[in-house]
Amino acid sequence: MAQNRSRNGSPERAAEYVLHLYVSGASPRSKRALTNVKEICEEHLKGRYDLKVVDIFQSPAQLERNHIVAAPTLIRKKPLPVRRFIGDNLFDKDKLFSGLAISDAA
């Protein structure tokens, strides 16, 4: 089984949830989306997720490659099927949690 490394360098099993959050700099909306996503992940997916945050101003090539039409956008790449959450859908934590279809089973 392939192992990922957590941010602190310790080995861990492969992430069950792979999320990519596309933000537009340090805008209030981007900060709020990042806070909500991190809180949900830490509360319900601790040790089972990989969150990649992409600033579209720093990586504009990512926009076309990943079909990003607005920021903030969250893409749940794993587990399948891929799901996208755009703009205001990232600000209601209950709806976001439900939409991510998170299983609390470890």
Image (cartoon, helix red, strand yellow):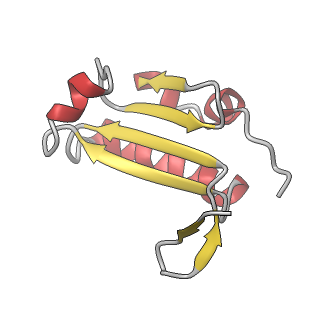
Q: Quadrant of the N terminus?
A: bottom right
Q: Is residue 106 left or right of residue 87?
A: right
Where on the picture, by quarter, is residue 29? top left
Q: Residue at x 23, y 27 (%)?
A: 63
Q: Name the side, left or right, on which 102 lies relative to 6.
A: right
Residue name at image x 80 percent, y 43 percent: 103
Displayed quadrant of residue 14: bottom right
Total label count? 0
Point out the image quarter for the C terminus: bottom right
Residue 10 in the image: x percent, y percent? 56, 82
Taking the spot 47% from the left edge, 73% from the top edge, the residue there is 7
Q: Position of residue 18 (x, y in %)?
A: 54, 45
| Outermost residue toward the right in this view | 105
Q: Is residue 101 above or below residue 26?
A: above
| 96 over 104 or under it: above or below | above
Q: What residue do we see at 20% from left, 44% from top?
A: 25
Outermost residue, front side = 1
Q: What is the x, y in percent for residue 9?
A: 48, 81
On screen, residue 61 versus residue 89, left or right, reads left
Q: Is residue 20 above or below residue 87?
A: below
Position in image of residue 45 (x %, y %) = 68, 55
Q: Nearer the viewer, residue 66 or 54?
A: 66
Left or right side of 17 for 20: left
